Image (spheres, rainbow, N blue to C red):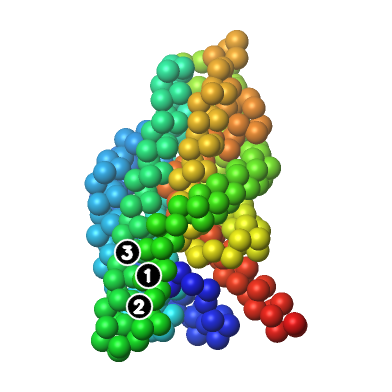
């Protein structure tokens, strides 16, 4: 699964199967939304939105495992490459169904609470990666099972590649750090939010806020991680498993940055609301994971196609 896909796999068939997997994922996760959604529809899917993230992650993991097994079966030979993507598709739906991140910050006036939110965001980013990791592990177990059944040594080698991708810490560190650094740079550039007026509950004056909208966050994340992965993979031809941890490192960087710039102004408005580049720290963790994983997969796939194109020319 984690080696470079064959050219024949970039055709209409894989696109159709991916669409079927996405529709199935969206349907199941939409049904599960009733157990995850915030009590207040305006709040996002986050600890700060009074959502039981632990329970939400457990539900997503269970659904994800089942979805990966089914997806692996219905996608046939393409299963190893796309079966696990049903999980981030579903998480993406949850992030869209929830409220915008502004609903969290607008209710906070206490500086310590505002700073604490970023630590919560880092923890949430790690937690939301658990369902995806479960899907990747299940996919590889399915590959190993199938290889034993078919006596296909090449298939079993993919599972070994998965393990070596984790054990080879030098490659892992190289791909993760470079992808994260580039992703942060792109995110900061792309995620400049629009100024929106809102009335704080305990202030009579109308204040201006700089917060990222869900749409802006999705666009910024997909573009940033796709480009970062493509660029790094062009210089270092490593397995895709080395790129996924960059999501966690990216979350650590942007949320730590948000915590340190959080100082507020004379009117006690958080600095993140008045610093255009600080808006990157208001991206919700669930959105970061849900759209970061497919973006990395997409960027990796495009990079592989570029390699294949150059080989044909030579």
| Element at label 2 | helix
| Element at label 1 | helix
In the image, which disc is placed on residue 24? none
Q: Are marks 2 and 1 in contact (CB under 8 Å)?
A: yes
Instruction: For marks 2 and 1, give the CA distance.
Output: 7 Å
Q: Tag 3: Cα neighbours inside 10 Å, few (<14), some, or many (≥20)?
A: some
Q: Tag 2: Cα neighbours inside 10 Å, few (<14), some, or many (≥20)?
A: some
Q: Name the residue tied to disc 1.
A: 160
Query: Residue 71's image quarter?
Result: bottom left
Q: Name the residue tied to disc 2.
A: 156
Q: Residue furthest right?
A: 313
Q: Residue furthest top?
A: 266
Q: Position of residue 4 (x, y in %)?
A: 53, 74
Horizontal placement of 246 versus 120: left or right? right
- Residue pictured at 50% horizontal, 22% vertical: 200
Work out whether 314 lies above or below 213: below
Regarding residue 50, the answer to whether it shows in the image is yes
**Mark sitting earlier along the chain (3/1):** 3
Q: Are marks 3 and 1 in contact (CB under 8 Å)?
A: no
Please name which of the two marks, 3 or 1, marks the residue nearer to the observer. Answer: 1
- Residue pictured at 38% horizontal, 44% vertical: 126
Horizontal placement of 106 versus 153: left or right? right
Q: Are marks 3 and 2 in contact (CB under 8 Å)?
A: no
Q: Position of residue 215 (x, y in %)?
A: 56, 50
- Residue pictured at 33% horizontal, 52% vertical: 130
Q: Name the residue tied to disc 3.
A: 137
- Residue pictured at 61% horizontal, 61% vertical: 236
Work out whether 281 lies above or below 126: above
């Amino acid at each position: 699964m984690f080696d470079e896909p064959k050219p024949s796999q970039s055709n209409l068939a894989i696109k159709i199967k991916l669409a079927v997997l996405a529709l199935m994922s969206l349907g199941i996760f939409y049904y599960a939304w009733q157990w995850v959604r915030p009590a207040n529809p305006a709040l996002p899917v986050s600890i700060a939105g009074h959502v039981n993230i632990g329970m939400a992650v457990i539900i997503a993991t269970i659904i994800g495992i089942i979805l990966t097994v089914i997806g692996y079966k219905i996608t046939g030979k393409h299963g190893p490459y796309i079966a696990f993507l049903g999980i981030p598709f579903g998480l993406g739906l949850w992030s869209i169904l929830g409220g915008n991140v502004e609903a969290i910050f607008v209710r906070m006036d206490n500086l310590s609470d505002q700073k604490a939110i970023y630590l919560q965001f880092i923890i949430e980013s790690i937690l939301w990666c658990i369902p995806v990791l479960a899907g990747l592990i299940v996919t590889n177990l399915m590959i190993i099972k199938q290889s034993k059944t078919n006596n296909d040594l090449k298939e079993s080698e993919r599972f070994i590649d998965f393990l070596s991708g984790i054990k080879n810490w030098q490659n892992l560190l190289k791909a993760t750090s470079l992808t994260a650094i580039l992703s942060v740079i792109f995110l900061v550039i792309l995620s400049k939010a629009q100024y929106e007026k809102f009335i704080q509950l305990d202030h009579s004056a109308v204040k201006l806020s700089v917060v990222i909208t869900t749409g802006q966050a999705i666009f910024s994340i997909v573009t940033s991680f796709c480009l970062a992965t493509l660029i790094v993979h062009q210089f270092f031809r490593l397995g895709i498993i080395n790129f996924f941890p960059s999501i966690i490192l990216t979350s650590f960087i942007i949320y730590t940055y948000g915590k340190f710039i959080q100082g507020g102004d004379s009117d006690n408005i958080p600095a993140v609301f008045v610093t255009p580049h600080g808006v990157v720290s208001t991206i919700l963790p669930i959105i970061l994971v849900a759209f970061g994983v497919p973006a990395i997969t997409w960027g990796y796939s495009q990079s592989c196609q570029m390699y294949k194109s150059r080989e044909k020319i030579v």
